[in-house]
Amino acid sequence: MSCMRWGAAGGSHLFQDGDIVIGGLFNLHHQPAARDDDFTLQPHNKPCTGLQVLPLQYIYAMLFAVEEINHSRTLLPGVKLGYHIFDDCAIPSLSLKSTFSLIGGDSFNCRPAQPLYCSSGKGEEVQSKKGSSLVPLIIGSATTQSSKIVSRLLASLFVPMISYLASCPCLSDRLQYPTFFRTIPSDVYQARAFAHLAIRFNWSWIGIVIANTAYGQMALKVFQEEIQGAEVCVAFVATLERENIGRDARRAALAIQASTARVILVFSWYTDVGKLFLQLDNLNVTDRLFLASEAWSTSGNLLQSPVTRKVAGGVLGVAIRSAPVPGFEHYLRSLNPSHRPHDEFLYEFWEKEFGCSPSSNASSNEYPADNSPEKASLPPCSGTESLEEVQNLFTDTSQLRVTYNVYVAVYAAAHALHSLLSRSTGESSSGQNIPACYSPKHIKPTEVLQHLKSVNFTTPQGELFYFQGADVPAKYDLVNWQKTPDGSFKLVQIGRVDGFDLHLNESAIQWNTGSNQVPISECSANCPPGTRKTIRKGKPPCCFDCVPCAEGEISNKSGSLHCDQCPLEFWSNVERTTCVPRQLDFLSFNETLGITLTAAAVAGTTVTAAVFVLFLWHRHTPVVRANNSELSFLLLVSLKLCFLCSLVFIGRPSVWSCRFQQATFGISFVLCVSCLQVKTMVVLAAFRSARPGAEALIRWFGPSQQRGSVCLLTCVQIVICATWLSLSPPVPHRDLGFRGSKVTFECAMESVVGFSLVLGYIGLLACTCLILAFFARKLPDNFNEAKLITFSMLIFCAVWVAFVPAYVSSPGKYTVAVEVFAILSSSYGLLLCIFAPKCFIILLRPEKNTKKHLMTR
C-alpha cells in the first residue's frame, strides 16, 4: 500500500463530524470553466470568485436535512450524520480534487483541506493512518461534466454518488456509471416535453440555441428524434460556449434575428442566456417566444433583469418540480455567523449581503480570515444584522426545486444507511437504537451502494421515492413568465410533466403577444383545404408551396400532402374541398344552344308551311304543276317532318324520346330523298320519251308508279328502324367516362349497326339521286328542275359527309347538337335549293309562270 499527499483542493469547504460523514460537491462560486481536456490535479490558476446564493441555499438544504435526520427517532436513531462539503466551482479538475479529499479520508485534528489519500492498489476502500473514516457516499455534483469524471473515479471504488442537478441522459448508462444516482430527471423527458409542446401548438419552424456541452447536444439529439415525422423542423442551431460567450451570444442573436422562426428553444445555463438576451436587446429583437430548459426557466437573475423584460416576454419553460420543505425558511432566516463560527460559506454571504465583516478578529475561527484589501476595508458588523427581513433568492422558499432535490438526496442516503445498519445488526427498521458494539464508521461503500439501489421510502412531504436504475420518475413543472402590473415577471405554473405525459392548462398561459392567440412559427403557412403541399427543392419539409388540387380532386383538411380523386358519380366543387354530385348535362331547351337550334327548327317548319300554302294557292300554275305537283307537296310535308324531328333531339332524354329520335329522323329524310329521286327519274323519263320508240317508257312513271316508288323506298327504312328499335333500341345513359363537373345524359346507341344502316340507306338514296340529277342537269327546258335537285343533293351530301367526323369527335351534348345541326342544314339546303327559285317566279316574276316560258329552250 502506498500513500501520497495532495495539495489543497482549491475550493472552500464545510465540515461537521459524525458517526457517518457524507460528502457534498456544490458549485458555490462561479468561474469560467476549464477546457474539457484540463484534468490536471494542480491547483487552478484562478481562485473561485462570485458567490452564487442559490447554490448556497442548496448547501443549507443538505445541512437542514442532516439536522432533521439527526433529530429523528425513526430514521438512523442513535447515529449522528456528519458532512464534508466542498465548493468545486463547477470546474471538473476541482471536482476531482475535492473527491480525492473525500474518499481519501481526513484527520479531524488537522485541516480537512489537506487530505491524506491512501489506496491499496486493489480498488478497496481503506482508512487513513490518522484514524479518520472514509466518506461512503457523496451528494453531487451539479454539472454533467464533473459528474461524469467523478463518477468514473468513484465507480472503481464502488462509492455511490447522488447528483441533484446533473441531468444528461448519458449518465443513465449503468455500464459506464454503475454507482451514479440522481434526484433530477434525465433531460430526455424535458426534451420530449418541448417536442410535444411544439406539436401541440403547431410550431413547425423552431430555432434552437444550445450550450456546446453534453447537456445541450444530448437535448438537441432527443428533440430532433422526437419531432421526426411530426411536421416540425429545426430552422437553425446555434451553440454557446462559456469560453467565447460574448462572440457566440452575438452570433446566436444574429441567427435569431435573420430567421423567420418565431419560437426559439434555448438549452443553456442562465448566465449564458443572460448574455444572449443582452445581444438581442442590442439588435432590438423583441418578438420571439422562448422555450426555456430547466437550467434557466426559474432563474431569478433573469426574471429580475430589465433586459429580459424587453426581449423575453411570455417564456414557456420546463422547470424542476417544486415541493415545500416545512421549517426550512425559518432555518435559513435563523442562520447567523455568531452561531456558526467555522462556517466560511455563511461568513462570505454575510459580507456580501450586509457589506460588513461578521468578525474583525479571525483568530477565534478555525479558518484564517481573508486579509485581502477588499475584505480588510469592510467595517465590522454590529451584531444586529439578521436575515429575518431579507428578501432575496437565498431566503425565498416559495418554490424549492433544486433545493428539494438536494433535500431528497440526503434522505435517500439516510434511508440506505438505515437499511444497511438495521440488517447488519439483525434489527428491523422499526426505530430501535443500533447497538454500540457495531461502529457505523466501519460500513463499506459497496454495502451502501447495494442498499441505495433498492431504497424505497416516503418523504416527509408524503411523496413516494425510489430509483429506477440511476434515475427517478420524471416529474417537471411547466411554468410561464407572466407580467405583473409593475412590469416585472413572475413565475406561474401552467401544467406539469409526468413521465411522457404532458398536462397543460392552455387558458392560463400569457403569451408574448399579449393576447390569447397562440403565436405562429412556421416556414410556410399551412396549406388550406383545396390545396396540397409541394416541398421546395433543397429546403426542409416544413418549407413548401401550396398547389391547388386539379379538377376532380379534393383535399378537405389543412396541410394535405396529396389530393383525393372524386368517385365517378361526383366532381370537385369550385373550392376543391368536397365532392359534389355531377350535374346531368344534355341539350336543353333552356340553354343558348338549345334555344338557337329550336328557333332554327321552328323557323324552318314555318317557312316550309308557308311554301306549302303558297304552292297550294297557286297549284294550277305551270310552275307548281311542272314535274308532278303531288310529289312537290309530299316533299314539302317530308321537309316539315325533317325540321320537326330535330326537336325530338332537344331536351332530357327518356326511353321514348331516344327511340323516336333516330326513327323519325331516318324515316323523314328517306321520304324526302325518295321524293327527289322519283322527281329526278320522272324528268329523265320525260326526256327519254321524246325519242322515237320510247313512248312506253313514260307509262312506267305515271302518278301511281311515282307514289308507289316513294312508298316502297320509305318502307325499307321503316323496316330497318322497326328491326333496330325492337332488337336493340337506344336507351338513356349517363356517360361517366368524360371527366368533368357534368355527366353527359344521352341516348346511347346500343347497336351501332342499326344506326349505321339507317344512315347508310339515306346515304345510298342521296347518292343515287345525285347521280340521276347530274345526268338530267342539261335538259333543254328553260326551267329544268334537275339542276335544282343536283345543287340540293350536293349540299345534302356535303353536310352528311362532314357530319360523321364531327359527330364522332364531339364531346357530351355537343354530339347531339352536331346531329341536329346536320338535320337542319340539310333540310334548309333542300328547301332553299328546290323551292326558292319557284317561289321567286310565283311571287316576283308572275309573267314567267307560263307554260310557254317554261318550255322555251
Image: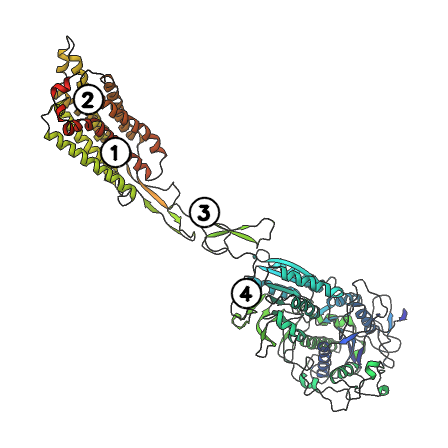
Residue 414 image-quadrant placement: bottom right
Q: Crowdedness of circle 2 by 10 Å Cα count: few (<14), some, many (20+)? A: many
Say what amino acid the circle numbered 3 marks: Ala
Would you say 839 lies left or right of 343 here? left
C-alpha distance separating marks 2 and 1: 22 Å
Question: Circle 3 — which element?
Answer: loop
Asked if disc 4 and disc 2 are in contact, CB closer than 8 Å, the reply is no
Q: Amino acid at mark 1?
A: Leu
What distance separates the C-alpha of mark 3 from that of mark 4? 32 Å
Mark earlier in primary sequence (3, 4): 4
Q: Position of residue 266 (x, y in %)?
A: 65, 65
Q: In screen coordinates, is 354 left or right of 370?
A: left
Report if residue 177 is visible in the image. Answer: no
Disc 4 to disc 1, how far (Cα)? 68 Å
Helix, strand or loop under label 4: loop
Check disc 2 and give the amino acid type: Glu
- Nearer to us of marks 4 and 1 is 1
- Per the rendering, the mark at residue 824 is 1
Identify the residue at image location x=60%, y=51%. Answer: 539
Characterize the local packing of mark 4: few (<14), some (14-19) or many (20 or more) Cα atoms within 10 angstroms. Answer: some
Query: Which amino acid type is shown beneath numbered disc 4?
Result: Pro
Where 666 sits versus 11, above or below? above
Closer to the camera in the image, 43 or 169: 43
Q: Would you name the residue on which mark 2 appears? A: 785
Q: Nearer the viewer, residue 827 or 556?
A: 827
Q: Is residue 93 above or below residue 539?
A: below
Which residue in the structure is indicated by mark 3? 550
> Sequence-wise, which precedes: disc 1 or disc 3?
3
The quadrant in which the N terminus is found is bottom right
